Amino acid sequence: MRAEITSWLKGWIKRSEAEAEGAPDHFAPEAPFFAVGDIHGCAGLLEDLLEKLRAVATGEEVCVFLGDYIDRGPDGRGVLTRLFDLCQSYPEKVVCLMGNHERMMLDFIDDPAGAGLEWLRFGGLETLRSFGLSADKRGLDSAGSIELANALEAALPSGMQEWLRSLPLQWSSGNMHCVHAAMSPKRHPRAQREQALLWGHPKFFSEPREDGVFVVHGHTIVENASISASRVSLDTGAYKTGRMTAARISTGGCIFLQTES
């Protein structure tokens, strides 16, 4: 059975290398790394994908998760708990970036009766249910939203909220820059606005960068993971397609790894 799995995995990697269109020679990270696309509460797919990463890992890789761990899918709590534990256990090897959905959840905790209330219509209800909480946005008044935010804070495991608030907006290695959503193609990677990094930029897909920088991102669902111009796109819409994707990126190389339900 193990030989069959190994054979299948080698075949998948070979196909993925072809789909990466030769993996541009301009990829130049300081060391190989993994990047994982949007998870959105799909805890089972995450576990399957982690198994695939372990099967090809050499031990030198940092694993970068590109944000949007919660909402839309059924088990936001399970995903957050898994990633939180990984970050605590392997702080030098695991990086979790902030996604716009994590930002919205924190905004709800900070301002539950105001701007944060919008989180509920972007998948927050599914995340609340995963924590054993329920709400109907249409019948939720200010007092009810504040009570719900307090209940969510109490349901978060010790240290998790502090961890979420400390999530970085980007991670870089060589000329590879990992973010959740996008970068302005005209701005230096270190001069990006938070809005672009978390929510996207109107020219991100239409204007390639001219500085040799490659942006590895999620947020925008693509049918298949791909490399185009100065971008590596990894969000294959796990919560709606049942497919979750990662990439192993090295100097001059890229393979895509995918799991599906």
Image (cartoon, helix red, strand yellow):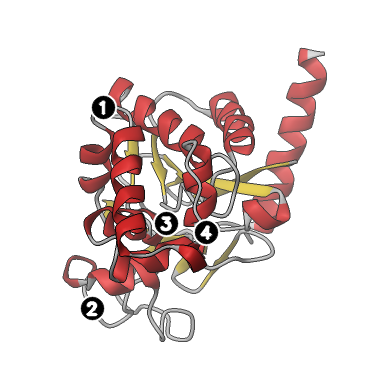
Q: Nearer the viewer, mark 2 or mark 1?
A: 1
Q: Residue at x 57, y 36 (%)?
A: 43
Please give the label number shown on residue 27. 3
Circle 2: residue type? Arg
With respect to residue 181, does 201 lie above or below? below
Circle 1: residue type? Ser
With respect to residue 233, does 245 lie above or below? above
Please give the label number shown on residue 158. 1
Of pointers 1 and 3, the one earlier in the residue sequence:
3
Q: Which residue is at the front of the view, 209 or 103? A: 103
Circle count: 4
Q: CA distance from mark 2 to mark 1?
A: 38 Å
Quarter of the image with the N terminus is: top right
Image spot of residue 84 (x, y percent) = 35, 31
Local secondary structure at mark 3: loop
Q: Nearer the viewer, mark 2 or mark 4?
A: 4
| 139 to the left or right of 197 | right
Of pointers 4 and 3, the one earlier in the residue sequence:
3
Where, by quadrant of the figure, is residue 141 drawn?
Answer: bottom left
Q: Residue furthest left?
A: 191
Q: Which residue is mark 4?
A: 136
